Image (spheres, rainbow, N blue to C red):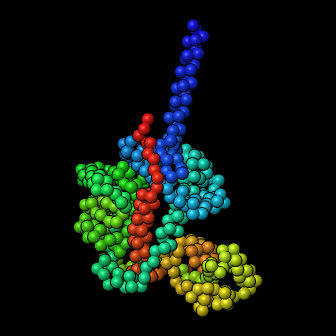
Amino acid sequence: MKKLLIAALLATAFAQAGAAVREADRIVAVVNKDVITEVGLRQRVAEAQAMLKKQNVPLPPAEVLRTQVFEQMVTESVQLQYAEQTGLRLDDAELERTLTRIAESNKLSPEAFRERLKREGTDLNQFREQVRREVMLDRLREREVDNKVVVTDAEADLFMKSAVNANRSEYHLAHILVSLPEQATPQVLEGRARRAEEALQKVRAGGNFAQLAASYSDARDAMSGGELGWRPASQLPAEFVRELDQLKAGGVTPILRSASGLHIFKLLDKRSGGQSHVIEQIQARHILIKTNEAISEADAKRRILQIRDRLQSGMKFEEAARLYSEDASANRGGDLGWLAQGDTVPEFERVMLALKPGVLSEPVRSPFGWHLIEVIGRRNQDVGAERDVQAVKREIRTRKAEQQYQDWIRQLRDSAHVENYLNEQ
């Protein structure tokens, strides 16, 4: 009898242990060909809690935060699978270079930065994967949206004549975004509208805006309390600017609708654009070899490497640009004039900003082809009094890119196959 009782107790213990393992490792969602597990979800919830605490944002109710993080993970999974399917990669060497730049931005060596993470209780492998995920999502956005945004001279001219352009105000904003599915039924739209109205009522009742953003917002910055930073009037839709201009610091807009969803903005501060707006400008030149049906990726890279060898052997940059560059700047020796951040595509800009004057870059791949870049000089320029066409185009491009990104995310998510088991036991 005693042996039978012991056997029964052991069987019960093993069964309970097995159930605990299954509970911990259970699948909470199937997203196309990927799965989200309970363990993965708990880990991401812990990361979100740590981020909110670091920013002194009160934590939302546990189930609310869990649901918010779950939805964010589903959206990220859809994007990362799309990135993999379309050939976007981040190898370990690139990841290490990114981690080194993060350490340097904190004025630490890579070793000292790792030690600091350990002291703060951060798992190094989790941190690496978090950085890999963020870099992949940023690169995906650049490729699919930012690099495809086109702003014409006619758009810039029309904008410069508009009333919005005359408003030089800048707004420090936080926001809550309740997204709207592209082909939502009336019932779904009604539910989303109720969600936005509920958030607004809680804000107006004195609720902590950052906590409510973490609870209700579908934006990627939700776990940062919805913080948007400073935005000039020219980067916001005219109807948003009209509402913001009626507010004092601390005020909240009514629900505002755009193509991407329903917005609630909190005005944290406001300042005049002023007559002085100094920006760093860089005078750069480049040589471009394009890829097309006749020139393969490998051939274009081989040609740009050959040109780089000739430059290092003493050939003048201007001469090489006139002979080889497949760009309108070739007859100017590759000179692109004075550029500011946002004037070029991200891949080109990242390298240009890091170069010292007179130093020739390694080959740089952009959507246009392969480049060699050289910085000629740098200056600080006041563009406040007379914003040129390029500055206006930059502001229009920022606004269009954000809108198109939200549209693209919504379409990608709506086309995904998602099986939700989150609330199943």
Q: Nearer the viewer, residue 218 or 393?
A: 218
Residue 199 visible in the snapshot: no
Give the residue at x 47% y 43%.
28
Q: Quadrant of the N terminus?
A: top right
Q: Which quadrant of the figure has residue 382?
A: bottom left
Give the residue at x 37% y 45%.
64
Q: Outermost residue, top direction?
A: 1
- x%, y% of residue 418? 45, 50
Give the residue at x 33% y 76%.
168
Q: Nearer the viewer, residue 85 or 192?
A: 85
Residue 247 visible in the snapshot: yes
Q: Is residue 219 left or right of residue 347?
A: left
Give the residue at x 48% y 73%.
148
Rendered view: 324 above or below 27:
below
Q: Quadrant of the C terminus?
A: top left
Q: Nearer the viewer, residue 7 or 152?
A: 7
- x%, y% of residue 249? 28, 62
- x%, y% of residue 60? 37, 45
